Amino acid sequence: MVAEIPMGITALKSAFDIAKGLKDIDNAARRNAAVIELQEKILAAQSAQTDLADIVGTLKSRVAELEAWNTDKQRYELKEIQTGVTAYALKDGKEAGEPAHCLCPNCYTNNRKKILQREVRSPGMVRMLICHYCGLELIQQGQRHPEHGKAHRGRA
């Protein structure tokens, strides 16, 4: 990303130097070649400028996302939702019309808002909270059996 800045500056400097030299050229062929070179330098500078504008736009968008997430994450606190099982739950009074829910602690620390989904698996009637984004499985009640499929990822 940063490499485009010196490239753009170099292209503009070269174009300026060529333009200064044009006034001293009296040979039409040399002048035309210099004009073509000048046009190439200008196009290179415009291309670098466009690349930088795209990068700035992407960065502004990402900053806006992170600012929104930083505001939203203040609504949650780490709670023990079951003995030995922690997740980020809505603080009292911060529901903003949303039903009660918990966020995946792994995703929360990676700046993602991923709601844990409740599932009951049998045999054994295991009650779990599952993150379908990162695969975290939190057992709330019961015990995991090999028939449940995926390997246990922890009781975070």
Image (cartoon, rainbow, N blue to C red):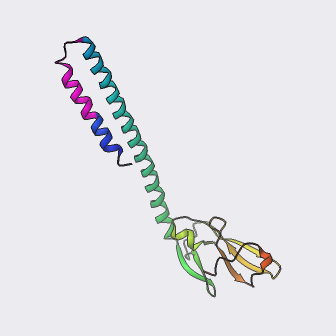
Tell me: residue 83, above or below residue 121.
below
Residue reaching furthest right? 123
| Left or right, 57 with reference to 22 | right
Q: Horizontal and vertical percent for residue 57? A: 43, 46
Secondary structure mostly taken by the magenta-highlighted segment of the chain: helix
The residue positioned 25% from the left and 11% from the top of the image is: 28
Residue 110 placement (x, y as % from top left): 52, 67
Q: Which residues are magenta?
A: 12-27
Up/down of 60 relative to 69, above or below: above
Question: Which is more toward the observer, 120 or 71?
Answer: 120
| Quadrant in the picture for residue 45 | top left
Image quarter for residue 44?
A: top left
At x 34% / y 27%, what residue is drawn? 40
Q: Is residue 107 magenta?
A: no
Q: The C terminus appears in which quarter of the rendering?
A: bottom right
* In the image: residue 96, left or right of residue 27: right
The picture places residue 10, in percent across and down from the top left corner, at: 27, 38
Nearest the eye: 40 or 29: 29
Q: Specify whether 91 is left or right of 24.
A: right
> Residue 133 lies in what quarter of the image?
bottom right
For residue 3, side relative to residue 21 (left or right)? right
